[in-house]
Image (tube, rainbow, N blue to C red):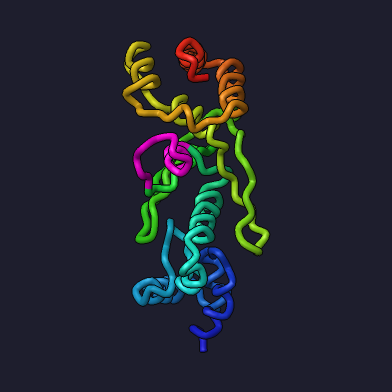
Amino acid sequence: MQLIRLITTVKQLPYFTKQNLGLALGKEGEDLNYWIKKLTKEKLITPLKKGFYVSSHYQDTMTGNPEQSELYWMYLANVLRLPSYVSLEYVLSKYNIIPESVFSLTSVTLKSPRVYTSPKATFIYRNIKRELYGGYQLLVFGDTGLIIKMAYPYKALFDFLYLKKFVSDEGTRKYVLKEGRINWGALGKQAKADFSKLAAKSGSPKMEKIAAWLKKERKL
């Protein structure tokens, strides 16, 4: 009966917490911990981080719909560490700006960096200063009304280069123009203009130099 009540309660939820499980089961303390271990072992729920879970039932509802499944995991990346938005390598790969396939959900946050590894996905968070937090679009996940924050391609590229460590200006220049295999052609005219404007007002000498090199090579 308790298991039926649990499934009825959480099967419509995109995620839930330990507190949610406790209320659904009417359990607390060690009794609740026992049930969580049992449900995890039986693969009815999956922990994404301590106290944060998703149900197998909810995931199964998206079987056969890769687009909705991707949006779901991006939504989870948003709520797993608030505030944050999906950016960096994940978005760059999605828009063919970098050639590598990326399987981790990479995000930018105002909080400290974190990595959450689960049986279903790896979530990576990089910190950026408040003045540069933004430049994301809002997507809607299915008919749920849930909102997903994902960086525009130009902003994902800015975040990536801004946060990437380089040992010298020459090393930076070589990476940006050639070694990084960045597909600057994947950015449209407006996106290139937005990248240039952001670099100019970012207060980052590195990003200002990158924009200057790119303009000289007619990539922006």
Q: Which of 57 and 37 lies nearest the eye of the viewer?
A: 57
Q: Is residue 163 above or below residue 62?
A: above
Most foreground residue, 43 or 86: 86
Q: Residue at x 49, y 33 (%)?
A: 186
Above or below: residue 161 compared with residue 66: above
Point out residue 169 in the picture as x, y percentages from the top left corner: 37, 11
Residue name at image x 49 percent, y 56 percent: 70
Q: Is residue 92 magenta?
A: yes
Q: Is residue 67 visible to us here?
A: yes
Whether residue 84 appears in this view of the structure is no
In this view of the protein, which residue sits in the foreground, 144 or 2? 144
Depth check: 28 or 114 in front?
A: 114
Residue in the picture at 56% in, 30% down? 188
In magenta stretch: residue 130: no
Disc tally is 0
In the shown orientation, is residue 91 left or right of residue 202? left
Q: Quadrant of residue 195?
A: top right
| 83 w.r.t. 10: above or below | above
Q: Which residue is at the far bottom?
A: 1
Percent of width and height locating residue 214: 47, 16
**Rendered residue at 34%/73% (across/down):** 41
Read off the magenta span.
88-102
In this rendering, the answer to whether 149 lies above or below 171 is: below
Residue 110 x/y as whole percent: 55, 36
